[in-house]
Image: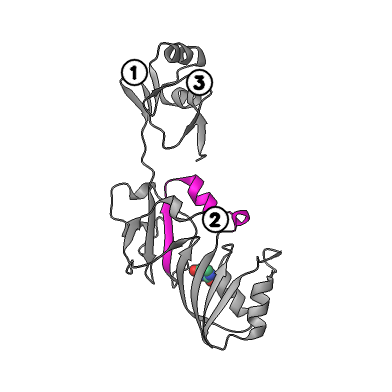
Amino acid sequence: MRGFTRLDRLIWKWRGLGKPRIRIKIEAGEVRVNGTLATSGAMEIGNFDLVEVGPEIVQNRTARYVMLNKPQGVVSATVDAEHPTVVSLVEEDWADELHLAGRLDRFTTGLLIMTNDSRVSEAITEPVRKVGKRYRVGTDGEITAEMIALFEKGMWFAKEEVTTAPAQVKLLDPRECLLTIYEGKNHQVKRMFAHFGVKVVRLHREAVGELELGELTEGEWRFFDPGELMV
Ligand code: URA
């Protein structure tokens, strides 16, 4: 789903009206976008703009931005035959409109974002946007200066044939740190530590961009304003 569509295309998809008929309706003042008279069929319409033709509604969607504190054992998917999903924790009749802005492994806990606004989910997940994801990481072995140096420099991921963006590390304890990464490769954090033969035994995402998990308890969700992400 793209962020914008031309007004005439949207109306054509709704009722199959061709451009000449749409032009007549626009000129007759029958077409409104967010309550204001439309001026041209070429107008760019966002997914959450209200579009009306005469008394009829062509499009009327509500943008939803949900942040969840994902518990362990819940899968980052919209449907799953075996396990509860993050979407199933949002017990609302609109929950099936949501998609995930990044995934967490089943054993990982913490901040997971869901939305029906693809522009926001793309902004969070596109590596070029460099949105930081901060994790609290517990390990089964010591986190050494050598590891921190490589994480902060960027490390080679052979499968993807890329070097990871420089991460930030704050050591809290010999076996615990805060790690901020700027992309979301599959099992990225576990693979970074596995490179040194160290296993991640606890993984909890505390923040995405400027959005902090804060007081949300496990399994709880709330709406957020995308401005809170500052991406
Ligand atoms: N890195 C991982 O290895 N797992 C996650 O769930 C998130 C980041």
The circle drawn on residue 195 is none
- Indicate which disc, 2 or 1, sits on the residue closer to the N terminus: 1
Q: Residue at x 28, y 55 (%)?
A: 91
Left-right relation of 183 to 154:
left
User: How far, Cα to Cα, is label 2 from label 3?
Assistant: 32 Å
Label 2's element? helix
Percent across and percent down for residue 136 are 48, 75
User: As displayed, is residue 100 above or below residue 44?
Assistant: below
Label 1's element? loop
Percent across and percent down for residue 163 are 70, 66
Q: Which residues are magenta?
A: 110-130
Q: Residue 157 sits in which quadrant?
A: bottom right
Out of 161 and 8, give the one closest to the viewer: 8
Q: Residue at x 59, y 58 (%)?
A: 130
Amino acid type at image mark 3: Gly
Amino acid type at image mark 2: Thr
